[in-house]
Image (cartoon, grey):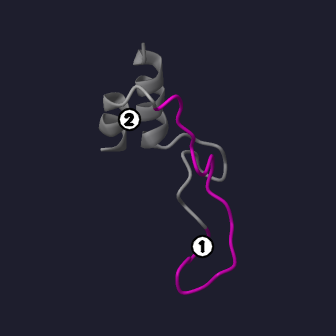
């Protein structure tokens, strides 16, 4: 959805990934076994979203 909105506004000049890769955090109720919001795993293996972002960025004109 974000990508569709970004494409509709010429004033949006860039995009930024919040978390490049997953990372370990303190164990707790909210985060069991680390933070997994990254585009890559902790071992730097690409997740499906990495390929989607690559496709998007290669096709931006």
Q: Is residue 32 magenta?
A: yes
Quadrant location, the N terminus = top left
Q: Which circle marks residue 2 in the picture?
A: none
Coordinates of residue 59 in the picture (x, y in percent):
40, 17
Coordinates of residue 41 in the picture (x, y in percent):
59, 50
Q: Is residue 51 above or below residue 26?
A: above
Dominant secondary structure of the residues highlighted in magenta in the image: loop
- Drawn side of residue 15 relative to residue 27, left or right: left
Q: Is residue 2 above or below residue 26?
A: above
Coordinates of residue 3 in the picture (x, y in percent):
36, 37
- Drawn side of residue 11 relative to residue 23, left or right: left
* Residue at image coords 54%, 40%: 46
* Residue at image coords 64%, 81%: 27
Q: How many marks?
A: 2
* Residue at image coords 53%, 57%: 37
Mark 2 residue element: helix
Residue wearing tag 1 = 33
Q: Nearer the viewer, residue 56 or 51?
A: 56
The span picked out in magenta is: 12-34
Quadrant location, the C terminus = top left
Mark 1 residue element: loop
Q: Which circle marks residue 6 in the picture?
A: 2
Coordinates of residue 13 in the picture (x, y in percent):
52, 28
């Amino acid at each position: 959805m974000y990508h569709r909105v970004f494409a509709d506004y010429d004033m949006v000049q860039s995009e930024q990934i919040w978390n490049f890769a997953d990372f370990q955090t303190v164990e707790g109720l909210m985060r069991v076994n680390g933070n997994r919001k990254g585009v890559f795993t902790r071992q730097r293996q690409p997740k499906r979203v990495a390929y989607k972002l690559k496709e998007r960025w290669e096709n931006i004109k």
